[in-house]
Amino acid sequence: MDKKQKEVLESERFKTLVRRKWTISYVLLFLLFLVYYGYILIIAANKEFLSIKLGQYTNLGLILGPIVIIAAWLLTAIYVWWANNRYDKEVEELKKML
Amino acid sequence: MDNASNVVQQFSFGKPNAYSIFFFFIVIAITLYATYLAAKKSQKTARSYYTAGGGISGFQNGLALAGDYMSAASFLGISGMVALKGYDGIIYAVGWLVGWPALLFLIAEPLRNLGKYSFADVVAFRLNAKPIRTAAAIGGILVLLTYTTAQMVGSGSLIKLLFGFPYEIAVIIVGIAMLVYLLLGGMLATTWVQIIKASLLLAGVTLMTILVLVKFNFNLGELYGAVAENYGQKALEPGGLIKNGTDAFSLGLALMLGLLGLPHILMRFFTVPDAKQARVSIVWATTWIGYFYLIIPIVGFGASVIVGRESITQIDKGGNMASVMLAEVMGGSALMGFLAAVAFATILAVVAGLTIAASATLANDLYIGVLKGGNATESEKYKAAKVATFIWGIIAIFLGIALKGQNVAFLVGLTFAIAASANFPALFLSIVWKKFSTTGAVLSILVGGISAMILIILGPTIWVDVLKNAEPIFPYKLPTIFTLPLAFIAGWVGSLIAPDKRAQELFEDEKLRTYLGVGVAEASDH
């Protein structure tokens, strides 16, 4: 490992980047857990809640299932948007310092 | 009058049908042509064999991941489950998707930057290679073996129903077709087979969905109404799948975090050039897989109304033929033949993905990494990869034939439970935890994998359903809620007992590679 690499490794900028990556990862993971295990636990604990009718036959459960799928997709999209626009720019800057 | 034979006569199951045979050969022809093109482009190196040269784009890899992941169990199984059990099928469908964001947040980018051919590379990166590769190979092989067996046994009976081939012939066809793709075109051919399969599957299910929606005037409420009129409002509400919180949470954990330990899925991330393309792969994979699980319940509900539950169970008790029967009712034997061929392509793509991952584990991790201590020439590595592929193909065919008629449904749960408990904790800890040591990693993999296996054997799915005992010794179907934390604890204890000073220093050094991609081999264009 050369001197410049050591400098980047120990720079506040690099440490902030790594910290931010994991903060975002863990916050999004927490939201994913909340949405999915929330859905599962509602089914386990309170089936009647999902049977609440929204239309003549359509019930809350039939809407919530697809919502969990869409929410999971959105969380993925948020991470990739952040990584493509913020993370990668910072990576490029840091690589220039090497 | 015999009801069952009536239904069988009404539908063209179990006997050769001109359309399905025609589409069957089309699938074989297209995939072989793709293999031929791939073979021309591939180099005779281990890197080309395992990673397709690392030049696959994020979009292509996203489709290939979808093709690698969506098995016949999720296509035929979930539509059948919705048709027979109603809402419970949707709960399952949701679970199959939610691992993908977690894979992106925790694993995908560092995996791409640290690994070369298999996830064991990442765990072995700064730890003692031989014990790690041995343990990781055990975890990897257990997962691949259970999943391959489930696929082969399932494919034998499916192809028998769909095309009328005898079971043994069906298993041999799958095994040989897969070996031809791999031995001629390696990962590049596998990638294209998976892309073709994903496109066919998405197109087929979209077509079916549209046909169902046309019948119900593009109004889901009308479809739900028809389901409720035939089978009661209960069919639209959660039923018996989730009985208690522990079982539910365990199933959710296995489906979600099991994905993060599936060797054949993880391996696909080495086919893209960098971490950015790894990320893009996941967005596309999540898009296609999410779309698939959003619309497949419509096909399932459509089948329950249009075909009827009674007819579906007469052909196959598990409901696996629901969507294919629906195709025959709505589009005649031509559409049925097309969908049958889609199911066949689905089986081929998944089995090919499993086999190339198995060859990386056997040849690169065990033979080259452990037995030869990492010393081998490029041509030895390439040869070892092909020999391992061949051996795995033969094992797959043998297992498929030997286990004919066995109930292998529990194997999919076992696969995900072992993947989540054995492979995922060690992989994750090696990426994020500086003090993770060789002893910790080996303990984590072994404790997670062995405890998951033992508890599933003692649980209701094997102890009661397969071994016919009255009461299970372990009360829950899936043990993930216990075995996953156990694997983390084992990794933690092992790292405290036998710390690894050198690995801790290397952890700092590898950060530039993990987060900036510095030092990752530049990808060549095939």
Image (cartoon, helix red, strand yellow):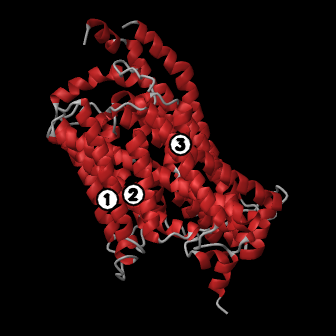
Residues indicated by labels 2 and 1 sit on the same polypeptide chain? yes
Residues indicated by labels 3 and 2 sit on the same polypeptide chain? yes
Residue at (23% x, 24% y) in the render? B506
Do tag 3 and tag 2 residues touch (Cβ < 8 Å)?
no
Query: What subunit carries mark 3?
Result: B
Q: Residue furthest bottom?
A: B1
Q: Earlier in the sequence, mark 3 or mark 1?
A: 3
Residue at (65% x, 72% y) in the render? B12
Say which element carries label 3.
Answer: helix
Say which element carries label 1.
Answer: helix
Q: Earlier in the sequence, mark 3 or mark 2?
A: 3
* Above or below B100: residue B474: below
Q: Which residue is mark 2?
A: B148
* Above or below B236: residue B447: above
Pinpoint residue B294: horizontal percent, then vertical percent: 65, 51
Q: Which residue is mark 3?
A: B33
Residue type of the residue flagged with mark 1:
Ile
Give the crowd class for mark 2: few <14, some 14-19, many >=20 residues within 10 Å: many
> Who is closer to the viewer here, B262 or A43?
B262
Residue type of the residue flagged with mark 3:
Tyr
What's the CA distance linking mark 3 and mark 2? 25 Å
Q: Nearer the viewer, mark 3 or mark 2?
A: 3
Do tag 2 and tag 1 residues touch (Cβ < 8 Å)?
yes
Residue B477 in the figure: left or right of residue B137: right
Q: Tell me the quadrant of the picture where the N terminus of chain B can be found.
A: bottom right
Pinpoint residue B144: horizontal percent, then vertical percent: 36, 53
> Who is closer to the viewer here, B43 or B454?
B43
Query: What subunit carries mark 2?
Result: B
Residue type of the residue flagged with mark 2:
Thr
Quarter of the rendering containing residue B468 = bottom left
Q: Which residue is mark 1?
A: B395
